[in-house]
Image (cartoon, helix red, strand yellow):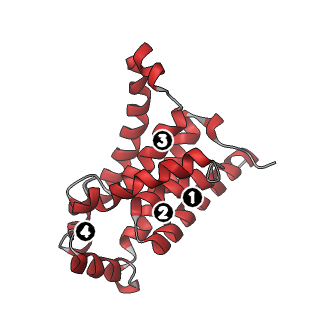
Amino acid sequence: MNKRESDREALLVEASRRGEQYFAELHACAPAAFAAVMDTLGHGEDPTVQEIWKASIGLTGGTCMSIGTCGAVGGAVMALGLSFGFTREDLQTDPTKTLQVAAAVAELGKRVQERHGHIQCQEIQFAHWGKAFRFTNPDALAEFRALSLHEGSGFKCQKLTGTVSSWAVECILRHNPGFFRKES
């Protein structure tokens, strides 16, 4: 393995570690994945990124109802989209630019679907535990938090958040390598 591959692998491991750690701290997959990707790529202190992070909270747990896309995927997709840097004017001038983002997002989604059978939160939860949780219900949320962070359950959503964060970093490095802010 050459230096470049070694550096890339270290970034992927770092993204995974951060994704798992942030999930454990925040109990929220979408902001954990978004922050893991942004921090790993050197954008965590950016005030704009910190503001965007706030928007990721609503994507947690399949838009908080389990019926939407997995929140870790949602947070990672936000990071992927941000890495392209397209402005409103860019899309007004050339709407086909969205195809570049779509290709990266589809790549990430395909990997999640191959590993977990689905990208929808409730389907992933059913695969993990045989049931799904509505995060609008405080009792269901408490049960999920206890289960998702319990060693006996395998830390499934925590590990998924780490894995998805790593895959998002990998996609960004492939599609937008200039987005990575190298340490000085």
Asked if residue 51 lies left or right of residue 11, the reply is: left
Mark 3 and mark 2: Cα distance apart in space? 15 Å
> Which x, y percent locates residue 124?
26, 62
Whether residue 120 sits left or right of residue 83 in the image: it is: left
Tell which circle, 4 or 1, labels the residue nearer the N-terminal end.
Answer: 1
Observer able to see residue 163: no
- The numbered mark at residue 80 is 3
At horizontal 69% and vertical 43% (from top left) the residue drawn is 181
Asked if the residue at tag 2 contacts the one at tag 4, i.e. Cβ–Cβ closer than 8 Å, the answer is no
Instruction: Tell me how far mark 1 sits from mark 2, CA to CA.
Output: 7 Å
In the picture of the structure, the residue carrying the numbered disc 1 is 15
Query: What's the distance in space between the residues labelled 3 and 4, CA to CA?
Result: 25 Å
Which residue in the structure is indicated by mark 4?
135
Q: SS class of the residue under badge 1?
A: helix
Disc on the earlier residue, 1 or 3: 1
Name which residue lies at 42% across and 45% down: 77
SS at badge 4: loop
Q: Amino acid at mark 1?
A: Ala
- Specify the label residue 23 is tagged with: none
Mark 4 or mark 2, which has the lower sequence index?
4
* Number of other residues with Cα within 10 Å of mark 4, as a class: few under 14, some 14 to 19, many 20 or more: some
Q: Earlier in the sequence, mark 1 or mark 2?
A: 1
Give the x, y percent position of residue 27.
41, 71
Residue carrying label 2? 162
Above or below, 169 relative to 94? below
Question: Disc 3 residue type?
Answer: Leu
Q: Amino acid at mark 2?
A: Gly
